[in-house]
Image (cartoon, grey):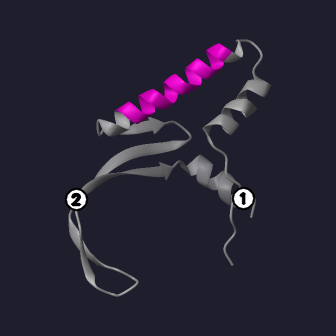
Amino acid sequence: MRIRAPKKNKSDILKTYLQSETDLTSKINESLFNKFFDILEKKISDHISIELRNFGVFKSKFMEPRYGSDPRNNKKIYIPSKWKVTFKASEKINKKLNEKT
């Protein structure tokens, strides 16, 4: 049986953060939050690995062109090369994730 985790988007995370932080104005906090994600996006698109200690590593990985099959009719299809983002969680995150089961 597959268990689905609840989803949170960027604005949900920002609202949760703003409720716990009162030192700075919400506009400054939102600006810092958005700047962090802009930098993350820029570095990943420049193919630079980003390691966030005790959280994980984001990397961009080049996928070679290959042939796959269309599941509807089982015909061979060409899949062109592309870049994709991978994330490897830290040991600390993996331990926290698995201790609650």
User: What residue lies at 34% left-to-right and 80% top-to-bottom?
Assistant: 70
In this rendering, the answer to whether 23 lies above or below 89 is above
15 vs 99, nearest the viewer: 15
Q: Is residue 82 visible?
A: yes
Q: Which residues are magenta?
A: 27-42
| Distance Cα–Cα, label 1 vs label 2 | 38 Å
Asked if residue 3 lies in the magenta stretch, the reply is: no
28 lies left or right of 52: right
Circle 2 crowding by C-alpha within 10 Å: few under 14, some 14–19, many from 20: few
Q: Could you say where residue 53 lies in the image, as x and y percent from the top left?
A: 52, 36
88 lies left or right of 92: left
Secondary structure type for disc 2 = loop
User: What residue lies at 67% left-to-right and 60% top-to-bottom?
Assistant: 98
Asked if residue 35 lies in the magenta stretch, the reply is: yes
Q: Is residue 48 visible?
A: no
Q: Could you say where residue 79 lies in the image, as x and y percent from the top left?
A: 25, 67
Q: Which residue is mark 2?
A: 81
Q: Which residue is mark 1?
A: 99
Numbered marks: total: 2
Which of the 4 quarters of the picture holds residue 69? bottom left
